[in-house]
Amino acid sequence: MTAPTPLAGIRVVEFTHMVMGPTVGHILAGLGAEVIRVEPIGGDATRRLLGSGAGYFSMYNRGKQSVCLDLKSPEGLAVARDLAAGADVLVENFRPGALDRLGLGWDALSAINPRLVYCSEKGFLPGPYEERTALDEVAQMMGGLAYMTGPPGRPLRAGASVVDVTGGMFGVIGVLAAIEQRHRTGKGQKVVASLFETTIYLVGQHMAQFAVTGKAAAPMPARISAWAIYDVFETRDEPVFIGVVTDALWKKFCELFALDDLWADESLRANNQRVLARDRILPQIRTIVGAMTRDEVVAKLEGTGLPFAPIGKPEDMFDDPQLANGGLEPVKLDTGEQTRLPTIPLEMDGKRPGSETTLPLPGADSRSVLQGLGYAPEKIDALLSSGAVQST
């Protein structure tokens, strides 16, 4: 099926690195926008990260064109300004003031392109912290997410760049809202999303819990669950999460696992009663589930309406049957290897976004992008010869 491209005709210029800014461009590209990623000469250093950063570039830079510019040279800066002059959207996530000092800030570029939507992805929105350097982990630690994730006294960052990615998603929401407003006003605007305030939005449910109950939320590993059975259970081989979240599902759960004695106990018919009796209920359930294999538990719960989940690992997702129909898209890495990576998790008009993509080498699209700006061949050759622009 042809992938939906609702943003076809929207041109995005991206000055980004790491995860948060590239996420904005990746989502916009996945929805059909033309995204031109400006990299330094030699390519973004994110391409060369090791360890947990080794997947950043390939995950968040699919579907983009690559132009390498020397922004310290007048010629490279002139190309960058020309790109911004013809763009619908600009995305950046460098330290506060970095692009302003180059003449690529909002004030300078909106003066030459009043329709520009300028998306800045920052550590903090305006306030006493706004000049600080922030990372996903900094925001998680400051904003209470790490506190809620780890056991008491041991703050632990979430197992993915959730704040970077969610902050990028908020940036996309702001960009789309600004484009919609531009339809009415003809004018662009500056959109700012941030790591810290995104984290605060994520932990807002725990803030609300305190406001409602007067009691501070306990870290997730020590929390008092709202349901008696809402936990990971060991089986003979691999663990399974099971949740029993209504009284009707309690009846069904007891029938499935032959818990006749528990169902016969009328003092356990209501959820809050079961929560108070967790210490009596759970050992019996752990014994029954522990005598089964994971596949046996899954087979018993499949189709019952009971929430359950085998405990998956990221590498397991390559072969997950749920993702076989558009959940993963083919990607040719810049090493030349083929893989599949997650498609934007949307369906639009019955179709999934995304299509086969190739990660560009640094500067792979420099010449064609300059041609699109109307540069004469001799000017392009001069820029390439001077080192202000790199092409591969």
Image (cartoon, rainbow, N blue to C red):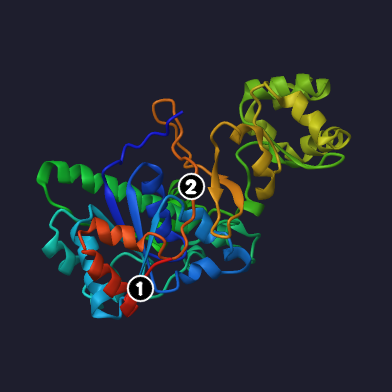
* CB contact under 8 Å: marks 1 and 2: no
Q: Is residue 211 above or below residue 164?
A: above
The answer to whether residue 133 shows anywhere in this view is yes
Q: Specify few, some or many for label 1: CA neighbours under 10 Å numbering under 14, 14-19, or 20 or more.
A: some
Q: Say what amino acid the circle numbered 2 marks.
A: Thr
Q: Is residue 23 above or below residue 388?
A: above
Specify whether 388 is left or right of 222: left
* Residue occupied by mark 1: 95
Asked whether 15 or 289 is in front, the reply is: 15
Asked whether 56 or 358 is in front, the reply is: 358
Percent across and percent down for residue 337 are: 61, 54
Name of the residue lying farthest toward the front: 378
Query: Residue at 40% of width from left, 48% of height from top?
Result: 27
Q: Say what amino acid the circle numbered 1 marks.
A: Arg
Q: Quadrant of residue 267?
A: top right
- Image disc number at residue 357: 2
Percent across and percent down for residue 391 are: 39, 67
Disc 1 is placed on an element classified as loop
